[in-house]
Image (spheres, rainbow, N blue to C red):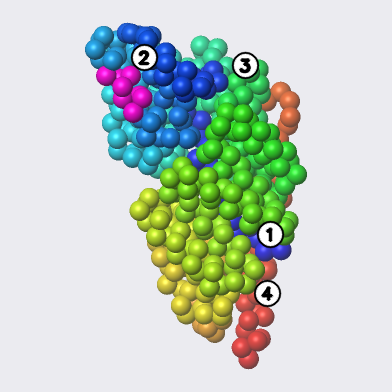
Amino acid sequence: MKSKKIIHIISLICFALLFMDAKAQEDTNLIKERIETSTGSEKIDHLLKLSDAFRGNDWKQSLSAAQDALFHARKINDSSRIARIQSKIGSIYYFTNRHEKASEFYNKSFNIYQTLNDPRGLANLYHNIGLLHQGNNQYDSAIIFYRKSLDIEEKRNNIDGAAETMNNLGTVFQLMGKYDSALVMLKSSAKNYKQVGNKRKLLDTFLNISDLYMRNGYFEESFEYLNQAINLADKYNDLESKAIALNLMAQGHYEMENFSFAEKLLNQSLLIRNKLDDKNGESILLNNLGWLSMDLDNHEKADRYFRRALKIQKSVDDKRVISNIYSNIGINLLRQEKPKASIAYFNTAIDIAKEINVKPEVKRAYEQLIIAYAQLREYEKSKKYMEAFSAIDDSTRLSKIEEELEGLLNEDQPVDFGYSYYLLAGLLFVLVIIVMIIIRRKR
């Protein structure tokens, strides 16, 4: 079986945000009735509940309700609610890929909370500013803000708030390749959510745990969490989370070579993305369908999927996904024995990945250039990229659990992922063998 190809940028979708009430989402019609019959602060709170109810289903209505709440909060000059609503609006802008607007509203909210000396509000803002840095691939900065948030929440004994920040710290560690630390944080988050009975937010953490297991080949463990996540998504009518879960489950069945079922799951997820008008999610699904088509040797169909995904993704401008798609187009050409045509795509993927400092995508393109130049019998260039591949720090090597994280989890110890070093050595050996085989064939 080939190495994993279906990408799942789950951590860019499943961040836990501190802008939704812990209570389950209520029926929107009932909330609207309450809005019509209420005034002042009560009306504002119902508008915020309406905004939360539309989260994951209709971002435009979520934003509209939040803006109405901000209007009424300003009318009564309620500084605390104004700050809270501005933070919520910033989070909505973040999820709709308008990061500059998100930063603008976060800063407005932060200034008010500092004036009020409100620890709860500051913890929320630190968390969401960390999220913004994480979404911009600024992982070290994200960790700084998350730790500030976690410190405040633990001093306040806010189990629910600490769980959200642990969830996001887990996703950052995962993106940095520190899978052991990620699992500790994510399971600690799940434990906290269970303790306070917050099943709505437990859903996000279940998705992130399943993603972590999936990336490391623990499919049965991943499916267990995914089934729980889908049940919760159906309960709360969270289409976005369900689409993520279906995409992840498709990856597992793809890896297990259940290709027909994987394609069915991907198309179900794609229908949800279309319904949500989620361009970023749609492009990722098209990219995944391209991989599936390529592995079934339908290269023309795969190319159409990849180019549709690329066209959409250029309007969204998620550079990590764009880099991945360029590599995929190159790999599709390489499999058709068109190495010369593939090289330009790999180089473009490298340039984009270096721009945002995403080493796994750089290494992935280097690996393909080794093979491309070997097919062209340009062995010196092939050797050059093999050296470049080896020289990059192994950003996917699984780290030891950091000392400061010890003791956070009292049960469910993390799975030992210590085989990564041997996987890297084995991969390099396989690449050498591939090049030797190609050289022999060309002779």
Name the kind of residue labelled 3 in the image: Val
Task: Classify 10 Å Cα crowding around label 3: few (below 14), some (14-19), many (20 and above).
Answer: few
Name the kind of residue labelled 2 in the image: Glu
Report the predominant secondary structure element of the magenta stretch: helix
Q: Is residue 173 left or right of residue 144?
A: right
Q: Is residue 278 left or right of residue 435?
A: left
Q: CA distance from mark 2 to mark 1?
A: 50 Å
**Closer to the eye: label 2 or 3:** 2
106 or 364, nearer to the observer: 106
In the displayed structure, 167 sits above or below 346; it is above
Name the kind of residue labelled 1 in the image: Ser
State the residue position of label 1.
260
The span picked out in magenta is: 64-71
- Residue 47 image label: none
- Residue 196 image label: 3
Task: Classify 10 Å Cα crowding around label 4: few (below 14), some (14-19), many (20 and above).
Answer: few
Q: Earlier in the sequence, mark 1 or mark 3?
A: 3
State the residue position of label 2.
36
Q: CA distance from mark 2 to mark 3?
A: 32 Å
State the residue position of label 4.
433
Q: Percent position (x, y) of residue 232?
A: 63, 30
